[in-house]
Each structure stands twice: as C-alpha cells, then as structure tokens.
Amino acid sequence: MQKLVPAPSAVIFLDVTEEVSQARKQEQGAHNFAEQRAAYLAQAKQSPHWHVVDAAQPLAAVLTQVEKIISELL
C-alpha cells in the first residue's frame, strides 16, 4: 500500500491532554489515550515532517500556528 500512496509532505498533530479531550468531547475517552498520545508524540520526534501544535490553546492561537506551518511549507 505504501507504494501506491505517497508519503505526506507534512503532518500536523493537534495535541491535547486526555483531560482537555474529554472536556471538549464530553464522552468516554479511549481507554488507552495516554499510550496513543505517547506513540504519536514519539513519531513526531522521529519525523521531521511532523509538526505538533498545542491544541489546548484557544482556537485562534491554534489556527495561527497551523497557518504558520502551512505557509512555511509553501
């Protein structure tokens, strides 16, 4: 499958803690949220095309960071 689908030029990971995620979704979270988050953050550290944005910030700040990442890639 990897041969058919090109690798992305960028991945933007919107990172939040489990508490923030549950407060926003107001539903039961994944039972292994911490492990999944840790795996994504580890991937981000190893991959230069990954960008981590603290999505616990206000929406305007998150959007500003995402726009900056995208504009730097263009």
Image (cartoon, rainbow, N blue to C red):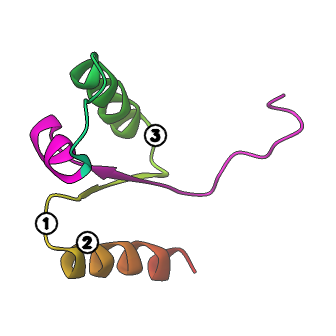
| Residue 7 lies in the magenta-colored region | yes
* Residue lying at 89% horizontally and 38% vertically, measured from the top left: 4
Looking at the rendered image, the disc whose residue lies closer to the viewer, 2 or 3, is: 2
Residue 62: mark in rendering: 2
User: Dot 1, how many residues are within 10 Å of its Cα: few (below 14), some (14-19), or many (20+)?
Assistant: few
2 or 1: tag closer to the N-terminus: 1
Q: Is residue 11 above or below residue 31?
A: below
Residue 47: mark in rendering: 3
Question: What residue is shown with label 1?
Answer: 57
- Total labels: the figure holds 3
Disc 2/disc 1 C-alpha distance (Å): 6 Å
Q: Is residue 24 above or below residue 74?
A: above
Q: Nearer the viewer, residue 68 or 18?
A: 18
Residue 11: mark in rendering: none
Q: Nearer the viewer, residue 33 or 44?
A: 33
Is disc 3 placed on a helix, strand or loop?
A: loop
* Residue lying at 78% horizontally and 46% vertically, measured from the top left: 6
Q: Position of residue 58 (x, y in %)?
A: 14, 73
User: Do tag 2 and tag 1 residues touch (Cβ < 8 Å)?
Assistant: yes
Circle 3: residue type: Ser
**Where does the N terminus fall, quadrant-wise?**
top right
Which portion, as a residue range, is magenta?
1-24
